[in-house]
Image (spheres, helix red, strand yellow):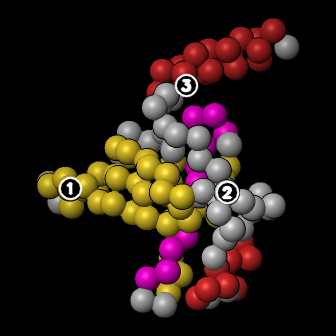
Amino acid sequence: MIQKNNFYDIKSNIEEKFIKKDRPQIDIGDSIKIKLIIQEGNKERIQISEGTVISKNNNHLNTTITIRKVLHNIGVEKIYLIHSPRIIDIKIIKQAKVRKAKLYYLRNRSGKATRLRPR
């Protein structure tokens, strides 16, 4: 037992170095803009991705969010690691009041039915 606890202490100390403190508090239902670095061949460029947060997985350093947006009548979902070194900036555009932890029901809706109540 003592060795197991010691391992978790060492692991948490290492993870603490890589956690980004400047990230905003992201909640489910927020519309956010993410600036991230994309590498194409030997060139790097900044790409901006925008969408609604439909789920969040809190796991310390491995915290992920799932972003959903509709492009040309096709729903696109992407999972991002919040503390990734590839993510430059996260901005919250607007916040919504939701009652569920996962907004997977938005997958079955389109148009104005996907609107969320503002907070």
Q: Please, which residue is most extreme toward the left here?
A: 42
Sort mark 1 into few (<14), some (14-19) or many (20+) by Cα contacts within 10 Å: few
> Considering the numbered disc 2 on the image, is that residue within a helix, a strand or a loop?
loop
Q: Earlier in the sequence, mark 2 or mark 1?
A: 1
Amino acid bearing label 2 = Arg
Boundaries of the magenta span: 59-71
Residue 112 x/y as whole percent: 61, 86
Amino acid bearing label 1 = Arg
Instruction: Tell me the residue at 20%/56% (across/down).
Output: 45
Disc ID at residue 119: 2
In the image, which is nearer the foreground, mark 3 or mark 1?
1
Instruction: Tell me the residue at 42%/89% (across/down).
Output: 72
Q: How far apart are marks 2 and 1 (CA)?
A: 34 Å
Q: How far apart are marks 3 and 2 (CA)?
A: 33 Å
Can you tell which quarter of the image residue 89 is in? Answer: top left
Can you tell which quarter of the image residue 117 is in? Answer: bottom right
Q: What secondary structure do most residues of the magenta stretch adopt? A: strand
**Would you say residue 79 sits in the magenta stretch?**
no
- Horizontal relation, residue 114 to residue 22: left or right: right
Q: Name the residue under label 1.
A: 45
Residue 65 x/y as whole percent: 58, 54
Q: Distance between the residues labelled 3 and 1?
A: 27 Å
Disc ID at residue 15: 3
Amino acid bearing label 3 = Glu
Sort mark 3 into few (<14), some (14-19) or many (20+) by Cα contacts within 10 Å: few
Say if 67 sits above or below 83 in the image.
below
> Considering the numbered disc 3 on the image, is that residue within a helix, a strand or a loop?
helix
